[in-house]
Image: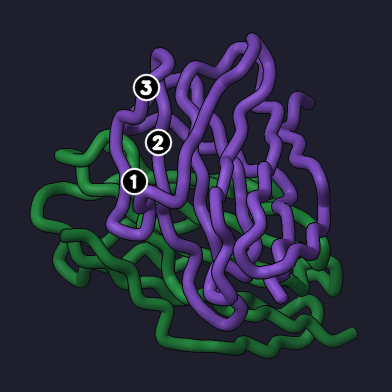
Amino acid sequence: AQSVAQPEDQVNVAEGNPLTVKCTYSVSGNPYLFWYVQYPNRGLQFLLKYITGDNLVKGSYGFEAEFNKSQTSFHLKKPSALVSDSALYFCAVRDRNNDYKLSFGAGTTVTVRA
Amino acid sequence: EPEVTQTPSHQVTQMGQEVILRCVPISNHLYFYWYRQILGQKVEFLVSFYNNEISEKSEIFDDQFSVERPDGSNFTLKIRSTKLEDSAMYFCASSSGRSLETQYFGPGTRLLVL
């Protein structure tokens, strides 16, 4: 079985401040981990993924995420948030024993105030 | 940048009617997926499709659902007899491979069953 938890429904930060969106996962084997972002009336846009190797993964728009196996976490971070980063963020996991199905978290709404 | 497209963006139908949701995956992708998101709930996997056959399906994907790749570009999801609980946002996705490959999502079709 595979699942994801995003413990925060909402995250509010001021522009220029660091942004963190939390994600923890559960898989029976080893995970592939993904972050997607959804803007209003748009689909899910891929941000970054962890497959193997370096635990710190860098992605689009200045986002990065750190894979922590001992804490089963994959938190999304951005050092300096922009108002345009305001969106809905989804963490997703796939067990390496599973070829196809992604399991998503409930999503975290990020609001960056000017 | 290549994108997954979906039509229509919105569809309203009467309970018991058949609907067909259409998707055009990214052109060199070989793996295709449907997910859905009921309002206020998580994005859920429905089905994956490769080489003209279903490779994996969830328990949601019962006999009322079917998928087809009728030509070289389109990928469709058919719901034979819609129920109220089928009201959701339906996302199509595609990937160049399975497992560690990224799934790229379309903008979604919002289906409302009355």
Alpha carbon distance from label 3 to label 2: 9 Å
- Tags 2 and 1 both on a single chain: no
x and y, in percent, of residue B60 in the image: 36, 59
Question: Is B64 on the left or on the right of A5, as rendered?
Answer: right
Q: Nearer the viewer, residue B9 or B104?
A: B9
Q: State whether residue B111 appears in this view.
A: yes
Which chain appears purple? B
Which residue is rendered at x = 78% and y = 26% of the image? Answer: B1
Q: Dot 2 falls on which chain?
A: B
Q: Which residue is mark 3?
A: B53
Query: Which mark, by number, is residue B48?
Result: 2
Question: Is A19 on the left or on the right of A56, as rendered?
Answer: right
Alpha carbon distance from label 2 to label 1: 8 Å
Disc 2 on helix, strand or loop?
A: strand
Q: Amino acid at mark 3?
A: Glu
Q: Quadrant of the C terminus of chain A?
A: bottom right
